[in-house]
Image (cartoon, coloured by chain):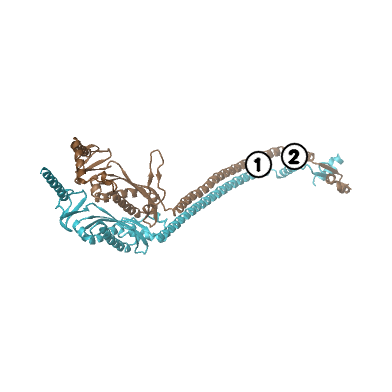
Chain colours: A brown, B cyan
Amino acid sequence: MAEQNQPPGASTPTLEEVLEKTQRQFRRFKGGPILVLAVVVIGVLWTAWFTVQPEETGIVQRFGKVMRTAGPGLHFKLPYGIEKVRLLPTARVLKEEFGFRTLSAVPGEKTRYDTRGGYKDESLMLTGDLNVIDVQWIIQYRIEDPIRYLFQVRDTSKTIRDTTEAVMRRAVGNRLGSDVLTTGRVAVASEAKIEIQKILTAYETGVRLVTVELQDVTPPDTVKPAFNEVNESRQDKERTINKAQEQANREIPKARGVAAQSISEAEGYALERVNRAEGEATRFEAILAQYKEAPQVTRRRLYLEAMTGLLSDMKGLYIVDQDQKAMVPWLPLKSGEQQPSAPGRQP
Amino acid sequence: MKYVIKATITVIAVVIIIVLYSGLYTLEEGMQAIVVQFGRPVGEPVTEAGLHMKLPFVQEVRRFEKRLLVWDGDPNQVPTKGREFIWVDTTARWRIADAKKFLENVASEAGAQSRLNDIIDSVVRDQVSSSELVELVRSASWEVPEDDVLKEVPKEREEELKKEIARGREEITRTILTEAQKIIPQYGIELVDMRIKRLDYVESVREKVYERMISERKRIAAQFRSEGEGRSAEILGTMEKELRRIRSTAYRQVQGIQGKADADATRIYGNAYNKNPEFYAFLRTLESYKDKANPNAVLILTTDSDFYRYVKNAEPGKAGVAAVPQ
């Protein structure tokens, strides 16, 4: 055949010549038919077996019709063109993500997520109080019936996604936003799981849900600061109350102590006052008893003693004759001490 | 001669192979087929998978899906009964129920898709625009929130939350499905299920909703802060009251104790001094002289004072007698 590709102008052999040449070559090679047979046999055998991995199930179709399923291991089938095999990972748990996408989850490394945020359409939904909420969630499922999975529904994973979204939105729409954000998470997930499974079973998808898990449930980005403010204000409230309580705790026990102190002091005062009174009364009575024995002498003695004590503490004493009153004005009453300290005034 | 026989056998073999090839066809699992002869369907649809026969050359096979198929509509902007514009995104599941009718009426899946678009869109519009938004969002099992939840919500929205749901999303969806199902069978299509996948505010409304959510949150935040301040004032008030109570009680007790002590002392003094008031006066005066001694004081006494009367006169009678009464 290579000759045909030669450019025009070269010597072109006729068809008969070529046939004759080929035939001659073919005859010369004695093992020819055996070789062809061998190639065909090898080809047939090569397509007559297949292996199924541990997590897979093989479905064997003969002329398109499902004949049997095959578990993990080595299996034989009729060769190419008659039987063919489809392999499905039936033992593996498959995952669908909603509202986010995992880019890579390499063991030992931090899982990376798609941060472009292009999945808001999936995650933003209306709550029962007509607010908007951002819900991210995942579902995990297994292919329970591979034949149904393949042949009852076309594009089964799209069906799973659509159904899950519809059900999740219905479940969230039937609750208050604040409920979904906090206590209602688990209830939403379990309610959704039951409902999704019911629908997928009705569609005969052959899929068994393993779990429905809510991931991040948050208010929409624009509203987030306001939500944070509520949390802050809740903290503020606690803090203000604690501050007041702290002040009360600081002052009241102290006031109690001070009160107890003043009462004790008053009691002390009372004791002292009564004791002193009694003491002084007793003393007076004792002196009085002696005074009655010799009133004149005692009286004079007491007077003189007192005067002695008084005069000894005085700074000065002038004894003036009763008849010489005229000299009293010349006495240097105090001025004698003060004037030397002010030299400018001295005459 | 030998060459001719050989050639004839070869030709016959080739013809047989071609005829067989044209007269046999395989049908994949999950598919159905209609045999068409010169453009006209012949016989019933073949639904069993496997190897089948047909007339060679004159008949051809049209294959159709037997499986459940996806219909995913474009989101539509539809006003609700309350005039809110929302995006409604619906999804449906359908299958080719009657391949013959299907072939005659819509010919292909693309044709079916556009028929479904027309029918479902119009039914969805009808149903959505005759329903309140809350009916579309909530389900019939909507529970009216309890009172402590309603506290967080402004008064004017309370009504909306308390509203009983007459139909709910499930019922509306069911109605859409049955309405659409009434029209669709003539195309050989079975509409299996219909669901509202997404329901969303249009952009401008969404902004408004966000603003409302923000103001709602701010209101709650203000309430929390005010509650905190109120509680704080309450605590401080109670504290002030307690302090005053403690202090005044103590004062009362102190006054009582001291008063009683003073009274006791007064009584004791009185009892004692009453025995000789004149002597008490004398004694007390002398004591007060001692107490009030001022180191800077200067005292001028005359010689006729009782203390110094002997300075001038040693005789007791003369000056002393006269001085004592003074």
In the image, A40: left or right of B167?
left
- Give the residue pinned by disc 1: A277
Kindly state the secondary structure of the residue where label 1 is placed: helix
State the residue in front, B45 or A225.
B45
Residue B73 position within the rendered picture, expressed as x and y whole percent measured from the top left: 31, 57
Q: Which mark is residue B140?
A: none
Is residue A67 visible in this depiction of the protein? no
Kindly state the secondary structure of the residue where label 2 is placed: helix
Chain letter of the residue beneath label 1 in the structure image: A
Residue pictured at 66% horizontal, 45% vertical: B270
At label 1, which amino acid type do we have?
A: Ala
> Which part of the image, by quadrant, shows the N terminus of chain B?
top left
Give the distance between the C-alpha atoms of the residues marked 2 and 1, in whole angstroms: 24 Å
Residue A285 position within the rendered picture, expressed as x and y whole percent measured from the top left: 68, 39
In the image, A218: left or right of B307?
left
- Give the residue pinned by disc 2: A295
Chain letter of the residue beneath label 2 in the structure image: A
In the image, A110: left or right of B57?
right
Q: Quadrant of residue A131?
A: bottom left
